[in-house]
């Protein structure tokens, strides 16, 4: 379960970062901002999951 909870946000971060990096010159600013927002959201999801996982008595 923990593996899935971390892999999904990590995959989203990796994909969005790769798209911005690869197509930076061709993407308009809105697309870049959209990918950066996806990265931030995935990082927040991972942080929440990690906090739940490490929090005593969470389960």
Image (spheres, grey):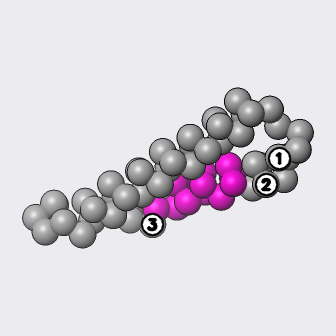
- Could you say where residue 26 lies in the image, as x and y percent from the top left? 89, 39
Residue at image position (69%, 54%) is: 17
Number of marks present in the image shown: 3
Q: Is residue 37 magenta?
A: no
Q: Which residue is mark 3?
A: 3
* Front position in the image: 30 or 19: 30
Q: Secondary structure at mark 3?
A: helix
Q: Secondary structure at mark 1?
A: loop
How far apart, in angstroms, are the residues tagged by discs 3 and 2? 26 Å
Q: Which residue is mark 1?
A: 24
Farthest left residue in view: 57
Q: Quadrant of residue 57?
A: bottom left
The quadrant the C terminus occupies is bottom left
The reply to whether dot 1 and dot 2 touch (C-beta < 8 Å) is yes
Residue at image position (47%, 54%) is: 43
Residue at image position (79%, 54%) is: 21
How far apart, in angstroms, are the residues tagged by discs 1 and 2? 5 Å
Q: Secondary structure at mark 2?
A: helix
* Front position in the image: 1 or 46: 46
Q: Predominant secondary structure in magenta?
A: helix
Q: Nearer the viewer, mark 3 or mark 1?
A: 1
Q: Earlier in the sequence, mark 3 or mark 2?
A: 3
- Could you say where residue 47 lies in the image, as x and y percent from the top left? 37, 58
Residue at image position (61%, 44%) is: 36
The quadrant the N terminus occupies is bottom left
Q: Quadrant of residue 56?
A: bottom left
Q: Which residues are magenta?
A: 6-17
- Could you say where residue 55 lies in the image, as x and y percent from the top left? 18, 66
Location of residue 57 with respect to 25 vertically, above or below: below
Q: Which residue is mark 2?
A: 21
Location of residue 54 with respect to 27 vertically, above or below: below
């Amino acid at each position: 379960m923990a593996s899935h909870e971390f892999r999904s946000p990590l995959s989203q971060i990796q994909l969005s970062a790769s798209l911005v990096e690869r197509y930076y010159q061709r993407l308009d600013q809105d697309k870049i901002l959209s990918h950066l927002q996806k990265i931030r959201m995935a990082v927040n999801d991972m942080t929440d999951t990690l906090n739940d996982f490490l929090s005593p008595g969470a389960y």
